[in-house]
Image: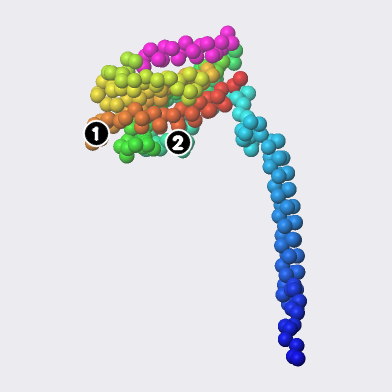
Amino acid sequence: MADTKEPVRKKGLHGWRAAAAVFGCGTLAAFGVFGAVIGVLNLLLDTAASGFSSDGEDIPAVAQSVQPRAELEPGALDLCSDYLPQISDITIASELTAEHSDEAQDSSFSSEVARTVTGRCTFELTPQFGTVNKWLFGFEFEAVIHDPSQNRDQVASSILQQRLTDVEGEFESIESQGEHDWADASRSFYGENADGVSQYVVVSQTRSAVYTIIFTGDPESVDNGAVSEFDFERQAEVLAGRLHDRFYRVIPE
């Protein structure tokens, strides 16, 4: 009687299938070990990084320290001619007037007496915000460099109060006023001047310097010199920040 039993098939993988399985498992195991190592390294890096910050706050990469100069050379604070035309925060189309006074430039000046540096200038300005029409930009400052009574800041504060009073008379009408953090003290005024043109004035104090920024619209423009307070303020904020930094660094301790 013929044997009808089927041959017994061996279970499992043999030949090339077995080789492929062994290779695949070994590769996966290797990747698994590699992934575990990467995970541990990431954990260590995250832990180390957390040690450089507190309460999730980022620490600046470079801590900058700006200190005032030890002294101010005669003529070194001529902002109208040597500084304003050079900075990139405003676009000056042309200089109309410029005045500068520094008592230390007088050959008979004594370092024991009071020293005040002043400047006044006007420019035609191409604004960076809001319009293509040019503005008139006026700037003036008074910096108390040396005071025999050692009260430079108090003297400057008195100058500031007087300047704030004078500014109100330079408007036909004032629509708004505001305090700003652009300097040690900073106040703005917005309205129309006697010619009915939009005007924006900022009076600030940095250390012992008091300075004024005046923006006025162009009466010959298509909008008859009307400029929004928002556009004036954006330009003033940028410029005031630069001036504050300049006065802080240049005025001696």
Q: Which corner quadrant of the image does residue 180 belong to?
A: top left
Residue 141 seen in the current view: no
Name the quadrant of the C terminus. top right
Look at mark 1 in the image and give the residue it sits on.
Answer: 223
Secondary structure at numbered mark 1: loop
Name which residue type carries label 2: Asp
Which residue: 40% across, 31% down?
234
Tell me the CA gap for discs 1 and 2.
Answer: 25 Å
Q: Which mark is residue 89?
A: 2
Residue 133 seen in the current view: yes
Give the farthest residue toward the top. 149
Residue 164 covered by magenta stretch: yes
Name the quadrant of the N terminus. bottom right
Side of 52 where 148 appears, left or right: left
Side of 252 where 243 appears, left or right: left
Which residue: 28% across, 18% down?
173
Q: How far across and how far down the image is residue 186, in percent?
A: 45, 20
- Could you tell which of marks 1 and 2 lies nearer the N-terminus? 2
Q: Which mark is residue 64?
A: none
The local crowd at label 1, few if under 14, some if 14 to 19, many if 20 or more residues have their Cα within 10 Å, is few
| Residues in magenta, as a range | 147-167
Viewer-proximal residue among 121 and 99? 121
